[in-house]
Amino acid sequence: VTELACPSFLGLPREMSLAAGGTQVLTMHADPVNAGQFHFVLGSITGTSPGITAGALTLPLNPDSYFFYTLSVPGQPPLSGQFGVVPPSGKKTVLFSLPPGLSGALAGLTFHHAWVVFDAFAVALEIGEAVALEILP
């Protein structure tokens, strides 16, 4: 695992209103040495610790219903671009979008997302830190 000069994952904005909806832009900065390998962005609503062990690495997401949803239906809302191949630059953008006027039951939740780069044998090569998005009423 290589230390990068910039954060490995950025998420902006950090808050989103249910009334207004919106899009969080998630920017992944993988090590360019992993270009051509697969990447997957996953999520959790139950936090980042203790996370999930992936070989010698730890994915900073707790397994929950949202985690399994993001794992089982890549490319479906609310995430787009979450699965693919790491480009030569290592930089990839994923979008998390919520339409306006969703159920108030989501208010107060914090969605966390993190990414993993893995090879054709599903061996984790690199994992980015988790980023949060707080859902406001």
Image (cartoon, rainbow, N blue to C red):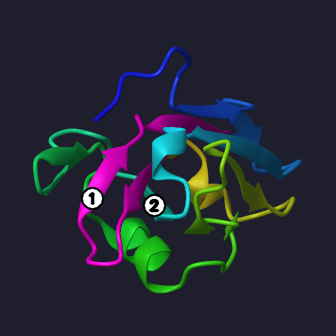
User: In the image, which residues are magenta?
Assistant: 113-137
Mark 2, residue position: 42
Residue 129 on the magenta span: yes
Q: Residue furthest top?
A: 5
Residue under the image location 51 percent in, 31 percent down: 8
Q: Is residue 2 above or below residue 84?
A: above
Q: CA distance from mark 2 to mark 1?
A: 14 Å
Residue 51: tell me if it is visible.
no
Q: Is residue 84 above or below residue 12?
A: below
Per the picture, the main secondary structure of the magenta-coloured stretch is strand
Q: Is residue 82 left or right of residue 25?
A: left
Q: Is residue 123 left or right of residue 104?
A: left
Mark 1, residue position: 124
- Which of the marked residues, 2 or 1, is nearer the chain's N terminus? 2
Viewer-proximal residue among 64 and 70: 70
Tags 2 and 1 touching, CB below 8 Å: no
Q: Secondary structure at mark 1?
A: strand
Residue under the image location 29 percent in, 43 percent down: 60
Viewer-proximal residue among 37 and 6: 37
